[in-house]
Amino acid sequence: MNVLLARTRAELRGFLSSLSQTLEEAGVHVSVGFVPTMGALHEGHASLIRRSSKETSITVVSIFVNPKQFGANEDLAKYPRTLEADLSVCENAGAHIVFAPSAEEMYPADFTTQVSVGGMADVLCGAYRSGHFSGVCTVVLLLLNLVRADQAYFGLKDFQQFSILSRMVEDLVHPTRLVGIPTVRDRDGVALSSRNKFLDAQARRLALKIPAALKTVAQSFLQGMSKSSELLSLCLSSLKNEDGFEVQYCEIRDAKTLGQSSETIETDHVLAVAVFVTGADGVKTRLIDNILLTHDPENLSALLDFAHESVALS
Ligand code: AMP
């Protein structure tokens, strides 16, 4: 395997400087791309890594299950950890360095700083996961400072995370540019997620209701339905609670600020949902998904693809 595995901050620095030097000596322009992950990598992560390796000359992937972003009753202990398989995904998608530190390496005993972005972190997932986005901002800012990438790649699957991190980077004038990558879905439309490993056949069948509902809304929006209350009722009528299927939230919000949506959608808005599905095995899994309601030609193709079912594993 050619991908370099760094376990410490010092190893990461060493690999970055030796690779940069080799590229400079070969006359190649050095630019660094960064993909932060929690591992258990799938095609969604691979699409971020491929994009980075297409656009930059050195791609760094971090694999770190960040304890600071898990609440006391969440799945930190059972979060899947699959480093060997992850290294192959990274290598095949074109990564050069994988940074997989321990919790102690990331957070030495005297670490006390917390980064938070205020109101945007208190809505949608933030209303139910207290402290989650502060944990995300703290780890991502630390990682951005360690890697010093030109560009960092994030999935729009975690739309609120991307909006919050974009705000953080803009407010703090961080030099790394953030790039949002469209959600990669399985052939049946379910968004790829490391937590899909927890779904048995029954939970998976229930999970299908999510892309089905979002798709109905995407089609209606593209056909001209523009009232947020109508789009929301349409979504909720497909997402009816039933045994093993429970909607935590389903909301339309301004895509940039995550503020309340206006009644008529003119600028970019996000329709975001969080759902609990429970399998025949009794395992309850929280899934999130969203679509960007947009007329902006730059962002429209992902919505069109989704509405017309041409989304499949790349
Ligand atoms: P995670 O390992 O779940 O923290 O995700 C790491 C990065 O991969 C985040 O930027 C996610 O938004 C992104 N990601 C996760 N699932 C997908 C997906 N299905 N499509 C695109 N990006 C994804």
Image: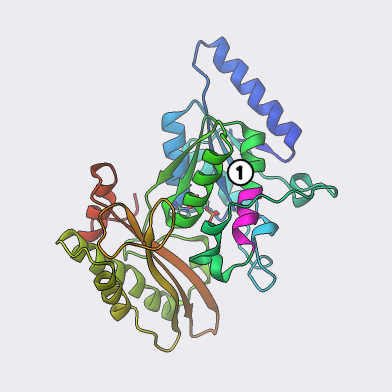
278 left or right of 84 in image: left
Toward the viewer: 269 or 215? 269
Q: How many labels does the image show?
A: 1
Q: Relative to residue 77, is residue 45 depicted above or below?
A: above
**Place of residue 108 in the rendered image (x, y in percent of width and height, measured from the top left):** 81, 46
**Image position of 163 (left or right of 114):** left
Residue 197 position, x and y percent, is 51, 67
Q: Is residue 251 visible?
A: yes
In the rendered structure, does residue 225 fall within the stretch colored magenta?
no
Q: Magenta residues: mostly which secondary structure?
A: helix
Residue 137 is one of the magenta-drawn residues: yes
For residue 43, above or below residue 189 = above
- The image shows residue 33 at horizontal and vertical percentages of 52, 33
Regarding mark 1 in the picture, which secondary structure is present there? strand
The segment highlighted magenta reads 131-138
Question: How far from the left and from the top, in percent, is residue 73?
Answer: 67, 74
* Residue wearing tag 1: 62
Hey, which residue is sitting farthest left in the picture? 223
